[in-house]
Structure formats: C-alpha cells, structure tokens
Amino acid sequence: MKSQYFAGVDIGSTMTKVVIMNQAMLASVIGPTGPEHRKLANRVMEEALAKANLPFDDITYVVATGYGRINVPFADKQITEISCHARGVSYLLPDARMVIDIGGQDCKGIKLNNGRVMDFVMNDKCAAGTGRFLEVTAEGLGVKLEDMGRLSLEAKSKVEIGSTCTVFAAQEVVAKLSEGVPLPDIIAGLHEAIAARIHSMVGRLRIEKEVALTGGGAKNIGLVKALEAKLGFPVLLPPEPLLTGAIGAALLGRDIVKQAAESGTPLPRSERHLQEATLFTQ
Amino acid sequence: MVYVAGVDIGSAFSKAVVMAGNKIIAYQVKPSGGNYRLTAEQVMEEALTKAKLSLKDIDYTVATGYGAANVSFSRGAASDISCLARGVYYLFPTARTAIDIGGQFTRVFKLDNRGRATAFLLSEKCAAGSGRFLQVIAKVLQIDLKDIGELSLKSRNRVDFNTGCAVFAESEAVSRIAEGTAKEDILAGLHRTLAAKVQTMVERLGIEPDCALVGGGAKDIGLVRSIEESLACSLLVPEEPQIVAALGAASIAGEKAAAIKTSH
C-alpha cells in the first residue's frame, strides 16, 4: 500500500503553521500571516511540501484550522482550533487536563478528558488578554516582542497597569516610561496584567493539573512565569508551542482517513487546489 | 457687561468659550498636546484675542475635562457631565438624551428640562465606541480624520466587521485593504460597528427624545448617519460639536458671576 501523508494547516491571525506527518512529523514550517500574507497561506504549505520532499497530490488528507481556516482552497476539511489544539496537546503531552492557548488574537482555555474536549472558554472579542496586547504595548515601548520575556525577568518590581483596553494600556506604558519607570518593571507589569486576565477567564473552567500552555504566549518566559505564579504550579510546555494546532489538525485528518477505511465509507474529500486563500466569506 | 469663560481640557482637544452675558462671543479649539497647563493658557488666550478681551476682563472662568486641574486661571471646576448637560441645554433646550463621542470616552446621559444631568453612562474601559477608534482607523487607511465622514457616505457595499475591539478592527481593516476592499466600504463598516456600541449604551440608559449628538465624533457625518440609523431617530447636532462642554462650563460660570453680583 502506498504510504499516507497528512497535513495540518493552522492559519492564525499572526502566524501560519503547516505540519506534514505520516506516523511521525516529517516537516513543519511557521510563517507570518501578516496582512499581505493572509491569502498566501499556500506559500507556507509549498515550503512544507518542499521540506518533506512531497508533491501536493501525495498528501492523503489536509485539515485546516485557526482564525483563517474559512476559505482555504487547498484543504479537505475545516476543523475548529479547539478540537485541533485538544488533539495536538493530548498527543504531545498526554498528562494534560487543561490547555491554555495564548494566540495572537485570541485566548482559549480547554478542559480535556482522555483527549476529548469537555469544556472550553474563549476570548476573541477583546485584545486584552491575547498576544496582541503584548504586541501593541511592545511596539509602544519600542521593544521587540521576542525580547519582552527576557527583559521582564530583570524587573526589580512590577508596575501596576491600570488600563484594561490595549489601546489605553499602550498609552499608559509610554507615559510610565517617560516618568522614568524602568523598562523591565513596566514589562513585568504588562505580563502580570495579561496573566491576571487569562487566569480569571480560564478559572471559569475548574483548573486541574496538568496545565499545558500553547500558542505564541508560551514562548514568552515572563508571561509563563506570571501565569505559573497565578496558577500556583508549573505548566507543561510542548517542544514548539506554535505547532500544537497544526499537529492536531494533521492527526485529526489521519483519524478521519483511518475511520473511513475501517468503516468502508468513502473519504470525505474536497476538490482542492494549492492556491491563495481568503479570510473573508465570499 | 459680564464676561465669563469656560475651558475644557480634553484628552485629545482643548476648547475655550468666551461669553458676554448669555451670548457666545468667541471660541477656540486646539490639540491638547502633552503640556496641559500651557495648552490651557494658549487656548484661552486665543479665544480672548478673538473676543478682543484680556484675561482681566473675565469675571468668572470654569474649567472642566480630563485636564481641568491644569487650568490655573479658573475660579472653579465642574464635572464633564454637568458641563456637557448644560451646554446641550443651551443649544437644544428640548434635548432629553445626549451622546458625547470624545477622543477617549463616549458618554451617554439624560437631562431634565433645566439642563441638569439625571443619569449617565461612560465607556471608560474600552476604546471601542470612542473617537479613539476612528483615529486608529484613519491612521491605518492613511486618510485625514476629518475626511472620514464624507468618504464613508460614498460606500455602496458596506463590509461587516467581525469585531468591536479597536485593536482587532485595525487588523481586520488592514486585511480588507490587502484584499482590495474600497476604503469607503471599510469606513462605512466601521461606522456601523461604532454605532452599534453607542446604541448598546443608549439602550441601556433608555432613550428619550429629543436626542443630541456632541463631541468630536459628531463632526463625522458618516458616524452621525450610522447612529441615526441604529437608533432609528434623527439627532440634533450642533454646528460646532466640540465646544459643548466648554460652552456648558461658560454657562455655569455665568450663573456664578451673576450670583456674586447679586450678593454684593
């Protein structure tokens, strides 16, 4: 039998992630979803195919997920990021009972039981409590997003951020900086603010050990520490926190193919083409 | 003749109104900048120059707004809401509900038949529904804030936004531009989003006609039309919507000056 390959495409608001798997991971690519790239998720896919040394037609099943999953012409199926994150985390970190995913434009809490989604909470209405909060405030402070975590660890004390709204917080931190408050103390304050918001949101689900942290937020050591302080215990981190959604998508694709083969039903496949995507319903 | 003044130092703009008795004789509007104390002096000075008066001619000055504490030459201060209510009452005595869309906040309030605010709501936690939202979008679309209104009226195919958050709307607008959507259609969609926020506030307070719209946001004709559509009523909009709080402050100053005069 010809070997089977599965692709997971996670088009987030900030990053597009593609993984190609058979029994193990063969290739993964993380590319920006910037405004111009949004419709160019196919480029990230092409890059992943090149890495895996596979033509597009050899992929048995393609599952798209994430904020931009709606109009992906090269996917067989769209599955919500909640299901994909749950599947990905259960595969990578089987002990996890809860996932906190801090994305560029949303934040999710997912309760798991044997890899199944029991319950979830999500904020995608307001930028506060998402990666965007840190992105916007970092820009205001003139600090690279990837340096925020490291810098915050140098804080002697945390400054209190009074604004909830990201727009107002960005103004507030610039004012604090001009007042002479040390940069690390401000950044530590920002991490504290976002951790408090996330903790209060996921607290609506009963928090249970172990907790896995995924998404871009999990790459910020300052935010990880601030959240661990709120939770009162350490979190589990996957090897690459950005990829859990895409891995879950590929695995769910594999599950679908397996199920179809076992039940003898035809595989629910789409007429797919490796071309530009759009974020908006047509 | 009794001369009085009202000075409103807002988060985005500062305004001064000079009155002779109960009549407006001059006003000035300028960006607040970073130094409120200096701006307060300048905006007052410029209004006085227009009125051909000097500070010593003014019998009473009332300060209001976010930076009211920086108006060193005022004799008193009054809350934004009481000044706004008084200003609306001066312009539109029949108004019973008013919406103020400022640079940072949106306020909705009810007023009685004597120009006193009886209830109000303030959107202070979130930039959605405030003038800030329009500033953010104007920047993204690279158009002048003052041109937004007219341009949005040209829309034939308004886009629907998925979000009310100013930060998310900004990125959604960027994606829309990247996909070739016309600016006017994006603007019309954003006005709709903003109007929906304002509508929620108004409905929470309960609308009672007539309804006035004031503040910098009222200078955006597209937003005015959008709110009228949402509320299904026409709005009273002053010719110069930005000076309403300063006008109310001057009107309160007039009352104080008159009270002092009769007590002598």
Image (spheres, grey):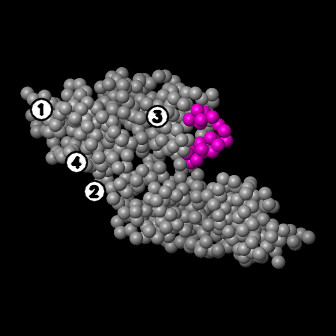
Nearer to us in this view, A280 or A202: A280
Say which label, 2 or 3, has the lower sequence index. 3
Residue ID for mark 1: A261
> Which residues fall within the magenta stretch?
A168-187
Say which label, 4 or 1, has the lower sequence index. 1
User: Cβ–Cβ below 8 Å for labels 2 and 4?
Assistant: no
Q: Label 2 vs label 3: CA separation?
A: 35 Å
Q: Amino acid at mark 2?
A: Gln
Q: Residue at x 73, y 57 (%)?
A: B38
Q: Nearer the viewer, mark 4 or mark 1?
A: 4
Q: Label 2 vs label 1: CA separation?
A: 34 Å
**Mark 1 falls within which chain?**
A
Q: Nearer the viewer, mark 3 or mark 1?
A: 3
Q: Label 4 vs label 1: CA separation?
A: 28 Å
User: Cβ–Cβ below 8 Å for labels 3 and 4?
Assistant: no
Query: How many numbered marks appear?
Result: 4
Residue ID for mark 2: A282
Categorize mark 2 by other alpha carbons within 10 Å: few (<14), some (14-19), many (20+): few
Is residue B256 something one can see in this rendering?
no
Residue ID for mark 4: A275
Q: Nearer the viewer, mark 2 or mark 4?
A: 4
Discs 3, 4: same chain: yes
